[in-house]
Image (tube, rainbow, N blue to C red):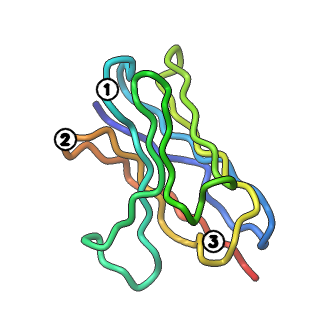
Amino acid sequence: VQLQASGGGVVQAGGSLRLLCTASESIANIAAMSWYRQRPGQTRDDVQFVASINTSGGTHYIPPVRGRFTLSRDIAKNTISLQMDSLKPEDTAVYYCNAGYGRWGQGTLVTVSS
């Protein structure tokens, strides 16, 4: 499966963005789809897990984003989306969509200004 991430941009602290990950084929049987992020100055090896959603629709978030980010999926459209609210400067990063087994999207840049 190929993944296309979009929705990044520049926003002021406290603002919102919605990231979208579109898959080239059905995501119905993908065990878990996730978002990761790579902060400025970090290498790709330091990419951080942010959130995931499983086949049952269950979600998991890291503590720094819990309550601010919401991950959802649309099986019919082969997409997952990450609604990011109350954004903070420390959320600035390139965000990558992941479908497991080394399947990554190309990344979308989120910049949060203070």
Q: Earlier in the sequence, mark 2 or mark 3?
A: 2
Label 2 crowding class (10 Å Cα cut-off): few <14, some 14-19, many 20+?
Answer: few
Answer yes or no: do the residues labelled 1 and 2 have beta carbons within 8 Å?
Answer: no
Q: Earlier in the sequence, mark 3 or mark 1?
A: 1
Screen quadrant of the C terminus:
bottom right
Q: CA distance from mark 2 to mark 3?
A: 28 Å
Q: Which residue is tagged 3?
A: 111
Secondary structure of the residue carrying tag 2 is loop
Label 1 crowding class (10 Å Cα cut-off): few <14, some 14-19, many 20+?
Answer: few
Between disc 3 and disc 1, the foreground one is: 1
What residue is drawn where x is 44% and y is 22%? Answer: 56
Q: Which residue is tagged 1?
A: 30
Query: What amino acid does circle 3 point to?
Result: Thr
Q: CA distance from mark 1 to mark 2?
A: 10 Å
User: In the figure, 64 relative to 23: above or below?
Assistant: below
Query: What amino acid does circle 1 point to?
Result: Ile
Numbered badge on residue 101 = 2
Residue 28 screen position, x and y as percent: 39, 17
All told, the count of numbered labels is 3
What residue is drawn where x is 34% and y is 67%? Answer: 47
Residue 113 screen position, x and y as percent: 72, 79
Secondary structure of the residue carrying tag 3 is strand
User: In the figure, 43 relative to 80: above or below?
Assistant: below
Query: What amino acid does circle 2 point to?
Result: Tyr
